[in-house]
Image (cartoon, grey):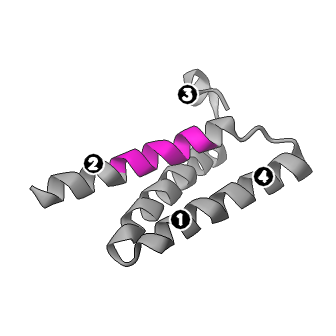
Amino acid sequence: MVWGSLRKTNIWDKLCILSHVFAGFLSCLAVVIDPVLTIIGFLVFSIYEINQQIHKHDFFDEEFIEFGIGFFIGVTLLLIGRW
């Protein structure tokens, strides 16, 4: 999915984008419990996306960008919370 065509997509594509963003967000917030969980969350997401690439020929560059956006939001909230 191209970010510019977000308005042209159906609800399932939008939910897919939100799930990738939420996965990145949760992976970042897992550092509060244990820093290893953040690494595990990233590895699980990476393995999932590589599996999608192999079986569905789905390019995972946009999914990693969405994951990164969620991770960035989580880092920002954690840093704001520390002040």
> How far is disc 3 from disc 1 in space, using C-alphas?
33 Å
Name which of mark 3 and mark 4 comes first in the sequence: 3
**Which kind of residue does numbered mark 4 sit on?**
Ile
Q: Is residue 75 magenta?
A: no
Q: Residue at x 67, y 55 (%)?
A: 46
Mark nearer the viewer, 3 or 4: 4
User: Which quarter shows the C terminus?
Assistant: bottom left
Q: How many marks?
A: 4
Which residue position holds label 4? 50
Tell me the SS state at disc 1. helix
Which residue position holds label 3? 7
In terms of depth relative to the viewer, which is nearer, 43 or 26?
43
Q: Badge 2 local density, few (<14 within 10 Å), some, or many (20+)?
A: few
Name which of mark 2 and mark 3 comes first in the sequence: 3
Name which of mark 2 and mark 4 comes first in the sequence: 4
Q: Position of residue 78 (x, y in %)?
A: 25, 58
Name which of mark 3 and mark 1 comes first in the sequence: 3
Name which of mark 4 and mark 1 comes first in the sequence: 1
**The magenta segment:** 64-73
**Which kind of residue does numbered mark 2 sit on?**
Thr
Mark nearer the viewer, 2 or 3: 2
Tell whether label 4 touches label 3 (CB within 8 Å): no
In terms of depth relative to the viewer, which is nearer, 62 or 46?
46
Numbered badge on residue 39: 1
Q: Residue at x 57, y 45 (%)?
A: 17
> How far is disc 1 from disc 2 in space, using C-alphas?
18 Å
Numbered badge on residue 76: 2
Q: Position of residue 60 (x, y in %)?
A: 71, 41
Numbered badge on residue 73: none
> How far is disc 3 from disc 4 in space, using C-alphas?
27 Å
Q: Residue furthest bottom?
A: 33
